[in-house]
Image (spheres, coloured by chain):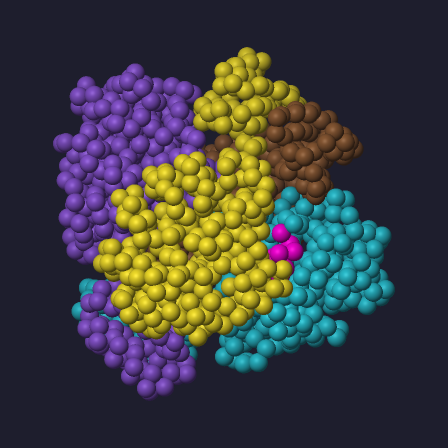
Chain colours: A cyan, B brown, C purple, D yellow
């Protein structure tokens, strides 16, 4: 941590700040410039109560030097984490594709779609039973009945199940049916939920918040790992920008950035990331070229009948094209499907 | 709802879209332009499953005309809602000031600060017992012990208590001690929490999300009213922008905008909205000039010792200056303290 | 400047970076932490070629400590700059109001509006002769003919003229007629234009860019002062955010922030800052409460006939209300009209 | 254009709005809903003075239906524009790579780098002679001397020259030496410059503004085409977002979106788009997978000595890796280098 003092700081001010830092258990190192005095705080930054320093009226600014996260960092674990979901390995050389409808709507809809995506090459099945909706008047999901249908689809197809959990009170129920519990973008900083997910033995798919920075995203993953659960898959699903032609803006920069900073796998959701089914094919390829470990894609046997997100949902036929495209790009970057 | 069809739409396409809308229970009205065919869907827009229309490949775009919220709108209720919190009225002619520390840290800290803000003119006491923190390694709040101290402070000063609730599992406990339950910015779209708060008989202080649009903010309030709880106070607490000199950017435009669109009261939190104690005085005045019904301000007997948010926290002395400034501005705009 | 080296930095690396900094004419100061080595570069930061340090593969990050601007800073000049425009003083105790139509459209429109705003209490007249328009098919302004009409309006009313300059090739012409040359938001970083305006003897009204940071805004002012022209008035005119109910989001936080950082005056444009005539009154008051030195407001004798910006333009009658409101708020904060 | 009237609109109001639209030369079509009256304005939307309608106090909102641009649209020209720059074709099946230093710094630096990028497979040479810099105290470019060096480099290597023009006053000079005139992100809405570039017979490389929407970007291209110059190449160079780990956020979504909306070619600049040399390789591949027609990449014989942008600049060795990666991805998506 670097603490910059205001120009008018006296020797007593410097001594006061120095003492405060040393009381917190760190060593200090003082550089006096012509304009500013800079104090370096060396040692375990996590002990430093940054707010108390910021609150000192003589402090100009406080600049953290170390990364705020530990367990998720590449420095903590050099080799990639490979997460095993019922035999499907995420984070290794193989690209993993998760596919299925936005919402579970009915037995027929789910099972038919599940068969189609399985046939086309998907490795896991997604489908929402608890749905976060902006309006209280929109369809809120089939809840437990939906979970049971997902379970039935798994039994038939063998595909592991990915489904969303929105609240601490749902964790136990969802964990009973699902193989991967998804945390939605709007819940990325739902800290009680993250804490509870840190205590269970299931894989968590953590979606990036709409305007989350990289540090915030990784700190949310850190909450889960700090609780004891190491099985976290990160997911870029598009951020909010001023470009409204697409529903969100896929930030593929963070794919190679995440790969540098953390050992956790990262997949991309081009369905939410674009909001337009005709952009899903090219952006799926781009995601893999950027280094993603997999994709999560919305597929429906008949998107025009989908209750939610029909405009960004692929037909099974278009999904096959995605898989073919991904295969070619994966090979071009030395990976495989 | 206006549905614009693609240029290449044939008569059959028009008929198909028309039928789909009519099946949903709305009437249609067709205008054929030189370039586009536009279909107006008249009637109860809430019956319209917008997604299904967007998913039709011949549909260019779907444009909602009506506001998505009802119960919170000025059209639903013309006169201002005035929320009574233990005798303090929010939303009327009087400006209401909520003050207190960011976190409850100890008995002494809380009681002393409570006495000071009471003396200076505050109408309610704020203080966090459950704290949403970006890092799992930061102080997470005193939890129930903190709530008990707040209760004690209320007993001594008579000030009603405002404190945050972060999860459905905490609602019952927090409601036992608090008069106003605060929903933090990161939970503005925690839908299970909003639903649960719609079922209790306590006032809710709903903070705007970091990058929430006006519609999203009001739809979150709609969740609470739709559940049956009409006692909602809105709070602007600054949005995320590219200007990092201040912690957030206070969006005062929305104060008069909200006043036009909804009957609910709105207050402003200039502490989070600026992140700098020296900006709190001018921005408190500006908030009232813009038409806000009140303020929520962080005050600590000794900000340099505050565990969290010390840099944006006022001393009791500076808080008095805020109250004096607010009084003058309130009079200038025909209101009173 | 603080230079943080990567964890793996060897003693030779440290020496290499140290030498590079010293070659640039600064002194160095080294702190070795358990995790990082931090090098402080002391002396004249402007000599430091930051990019060359960033480009070194062993450098983790480079953190500037000093402000990048000089001439505009409070440290360079402690007392407020008071800019005299034909006798109207901007930046002192008095609030200054600039008013007039978005575009100069005709002799009648301009002269009538000029008389009205003069009567209502405006101190300067605004009106665009060169118009920056998103579309090449929109009205582009009356150009020199418009400037001549502005000049005529000044002759009649005595109000100094504020009008926009868009290109270096227009500077001489605009300066012949105008008292204040306005630089629009989209030109805030038109560096050749800023340089040219630094060489003339006229007041410059510099509008903040749509997503400009405080540093970028002040650096653009610095360009003008560095050229020799000290007469710069800053103008907050709203930034781009995700809230589309208003055309832009007025960022009033920067008013007190600018007052701390620079000696230059700052005014607010609530017409562009809200894009809605009915929000202009409350936000004018809020701007003055926040500490602004003045306002720039669009007024048209008949907004429904305005060629541009009619929706955010006041009638003369509403403008009078703004002046009355501003007067009351000005008094409440110890200033006058 | 759809005009929505306020709830309280009377029959006279409807007639008034109707007449106003018809005076502008369009036909009207009225739909009365239970809550709103909606007027469709059919015909040539460009004749409609939207502002005048928005300014009517009875109008709730005005919603454009047609795209604001014409000449650049796919509807105007179905087949791809293929721009020929001294024999290099941009916009066809072949991927085009532009490479070179951020700034021209010296004869040796430029010629050596030019030889290296030519050898590695680049098709054009880039290098800035006029530099837009945030600070007036930073290196502003070698100006005409730099242009002469670029010309010399072209003579030796045969590579066409791409260089920036910042002001109308520079257009003639830059056009004398350059084959492609680049408009920087901060000048995307410098309308006088765009107009002047519409009148010359040189290819224009138009970079997207930092927070430009798709419509704004295409409208700026429309300015150039409307002037008569059809040779425009678009360039995505990253947008400003809240993620500061990378300098900008590359928005690859717009690549396939642009391909749908316009016939103009689009290339990507992953150097500015990431700001980190180690992200340039994966993001170059991702750009091509997304459908880009080419790349613009900063290369310097020795990035640690570059005066500007060293941290995002590749060594010739790393540039070769980019070319190899691009080649493989190009083949995977049916294109070639």
Determine whether A326 is above or below D78 in the image. below
Near-viewer residue (D312 or B133)? D312
Residue A295 x %, y %: 65, 63
Residue at figure coordinates x 40%, y 61% from the top left:
D159
Residue D229 x %, y %: 42, 40
Residue C55 x %, y %: 36, 71
Determine whether B334 is above or below B140 in the image. above
Near-viewer residue (B191 or C28)? C28
Residue at figure coordinates x 74%, y 33% from the top left:
B13
In the image, residue B201 lies in the stretch drawn in magenta:
no
Residue at figure coordinates x 24%, y 22% from the top left:
C149
**Residue A329 appears anywhere in the view:** yes
In the image, residue A280 lies in the stretch drawn in magenta:
yes
Q: In this view, does B285 lie to the left or right of D55?
A: left
The span shown in magenta is A279-287
Residue at figure coordinates x 52%, y 18% from the top left:
D25
- Tell me where residue A283 sits by quadrant: bottom right
Determine whether D29 is above or below D284 in the image. above
Quarter of the image with the N terminus of chain D is top right
Residue A111 x %, y %: 83, 57
**Residue A188 appears anywhere in the view:** no
Quarter of the image with the C terminus of chain D is bottom right
Q: Is the magenta stretch mostly helix, strand or loop?
A: helix
């Amino acid at each position: 941590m670097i603490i910059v003092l205001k120009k008018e700081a006296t020797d007593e001010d410097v001594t006061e700040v120095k003492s405060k830092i040393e009381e917190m258990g760190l060593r200090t190192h003082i550089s006096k410039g012509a304009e500013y005095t800079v104090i370096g705080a060396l040692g375990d930054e996590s002990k430093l109560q940054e707010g108390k320093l910021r609150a000192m009226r003589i402090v100009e600014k406080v600049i953290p030097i170390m990364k705020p996260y530990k367990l998720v960092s590449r420095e903590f674990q050099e080799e990639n984490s490979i997460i095993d979901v019922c035999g499907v390995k995420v984070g290794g050389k193989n690209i993993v594709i998760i596919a299925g409808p936005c919402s579970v709507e009915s037995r027929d809809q789910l099972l038919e779609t599940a068969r189609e995506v399985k046939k086309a090459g998907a490795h896991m099945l997604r489908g929402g039973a608890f749905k976060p909706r902006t309006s209280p008047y929109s369809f809120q999901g089939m809840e437990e009945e939906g979970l049971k249908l997902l379970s039935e689809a798994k039994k038939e197809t063998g595909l592991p199940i990915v489904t969303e959990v929105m609240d601490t009170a749902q964790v136990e129920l969802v964990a009973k049916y699902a193989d991967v519990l998804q945390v939605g973008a709007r819940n990325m900083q739902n800290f009680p939920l993250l804490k509870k997910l840190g205590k269970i033995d299931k894989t968590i798919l953590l979606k990036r918040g709409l305007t989350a920075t990289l540090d915030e995203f990784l700190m949310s993953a850190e909450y889960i790992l700090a609780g004891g659960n190491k099985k976290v898959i990160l997911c870029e699903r598009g951020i909010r920008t001023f470009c409204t032609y697409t529903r969100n803006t896929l930030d593929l920069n963070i794919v190679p950035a995440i790969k540098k900073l953390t050992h956790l796998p990262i997949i991309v959701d081009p369905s939410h990331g674009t909001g337009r089914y005709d952009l899903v094919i090219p952006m799926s390829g781009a995601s893999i070229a950027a280094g993603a470990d997999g994709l999560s894609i919305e597929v429906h046997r008949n998107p025009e009948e989908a209750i939610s997100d029909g405009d960004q949902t692929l037909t099974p036929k278009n999904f096959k094209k995605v898989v073919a495209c991904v295969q070619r790009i994966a090979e071009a970057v030395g990976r495989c499907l």
